[in-house]
Amino acid sequence: MINRKYIYLILCSLIFMFLCFFINVKTGKSISGPCSECHTMHNYQNGTIVVSGGPYRALTKGNCAMCHTGSNEGLGSTTHVPHVESSAGEPAYRFNGTVISGSGTNYTLAGGSFYWREGNCGNGSDTNTGDVCVHDVDFFSSEGPYTPPGYDPNNYGRPQNWNKQLTCAGNYGCHGKFDPNNSTLDDPFAAISGAHHKNVRRDNGTAEPNDVYDSYRFLYGIKGTEDDNWEYDYDSTSHNGYYAVDLYGQSVSSPDVNSGSINYLCGECHGQFHWNSTTGSYGSPWLRHPTDIDMNHYIGTNKEYQNYPGPFDANGTYFPDVPVGTDDGSVVSTVWSSGKAIVLCISCHRAHGSPYADLLRWPYDACTCGNSTNSTTQCGCFACHTTK
């Protein structure tokens, strides 16, 4: 007869293995491995300084730039750290399946790269002296001005007076927690504290975030679905899912905004960037380029938007180089159903940076009227403006 104690131990072992598997699946992007890879107790070992410039907060070996500077070559097979700055020269920037700036397979990710800051900004005749190709985050750049263009201090929970350079996280950054009444969160380390250890990969586009760790890409409160390797390799079926809302026909003065949308994130710093009045509604004719509009409203009309993505793929196929949002933050391969083709700020811009002025996803000087039928064009405008 089998001893009950052994049966109990076997059952406990099976339960433990199941839980380990479940946790590994749900927290597959959380930090793992030796603590010493990221932390140092005294920044001093065997008579030698561990890392110059330290010690850093939270006993880490460096700041955000230390961990997220490197090469993305082979991302997903050899490493699971997304690099947003290149340590190997100009990274490879792609559009429509072709590397159009840089070379090799050190590909930029969905947000682009901070590489093209200051002296590196300038690929294309549309990029002139003084143009900005990246967000000027303090770890990578010392450029100003401080106040973001179109900044609205009254509606998005950010500081009344923006008097610091942009940071990666916190009150003056994009990632992590923010609260203008809590100066502790001016510190990016405090704003992001604990998120790397608890990180849960988001596979439900509308799930309400509880904290930074389960927010989309550590963007506090933002929803969406996260691509497993940050769009290192991507196509119409494998990409991020951006949560967005459709404001078509709503009043400009009191739209039904949603603080979980990716456009709301951009609005936290650039809420009045494309703003000109407090009257009217979200509808044509446009004075400024719109966002938060579902192109499905134009199906069956004579509007060119119903032919997205134009010359780049079959009608209605999701085109990751000119992404659109969905009302459920899901990953879609086709867009012609209600709520699945919402125009985003990041339909045209990269979040971190690109080789082109204004962080555009493509060289604006490649947009030549009458060339929209050429699938080799580098102009993403033609994905929506298909008859131009």
Image (cartoon, rainbow, N blue to C red):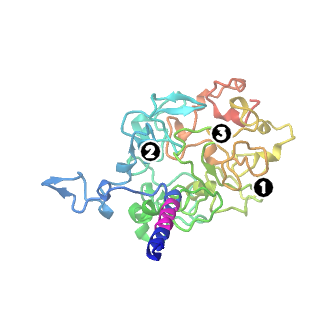
The amino acid type, in three-letter code, at marker 2 is Val
Q: On the image, numbered disc 3 is attached to which residue?
A: 236
Span shown in magenta:
13-22
- The answer to whether the residues at label 3 and label 2 have Cβ atoms under 8 Å apart is no
User: Which kind of residue does numbered mark 1 sit on?
Assistant: Ser
How many neighbours does mark 3 have within 10 angstroms: few (below 14), some (14-19), or many (20 or more)? Answer: some
Label 3 is placed on what type of residue?
Ser
Q: Kindly state the secondary structure of the residue where label 2 is placed.
A: loop
Q: Is residue 95 above or below residue 212?
A: above
Q: Is residue 13 among what the camera can see?
A: yes
Percent position (x, y) of residue 246? Answer: 74, 54
In front: label 3 or label 2: 3
Q: Are marks 3 and 1 in contact (CB under 8 Å)?
A: no
Query: Going 68% across and 52% down the picture, which residue do you hit?
Result: 276
- Asked if the residues shown at circle 1 and circle 2 are in contact, with their CB atoms under 8 angstroms apart, the answer is no
Which is more toward the observer, 14 or 94?
A: 14
Task: Tell me: residue 190, above or below residue 91.
Answer: below
Q: CA distance from mark 3 to mark 2?
A: 23 Å
Mark 3 secondary-structure assignment: loop
Q: Is residue 101 left or right of residue 32?
A: right
Foreground: 199 or 89? 199
Residue toward you, 165 or 140 = 140
Left or right: where 127 falls relative to 46: right
In the rendered image, which quarter contains the C terminus? Answer: top right
- Mark 2 surroundings: few (<14), some (14-19) or many (≥20) residues within 10 A: many
Mark linked to residue 84: 2
Between the C-alphas of marks 3 and 1, the distance is 32 Å
Across and down, in percent, residue 324 comes to 67, 45
Residue on which disc 1 sits: 281
Name the residue rendered at 60%, 46% in the picture: 346
Closest to the observer: 233 or 261? 233
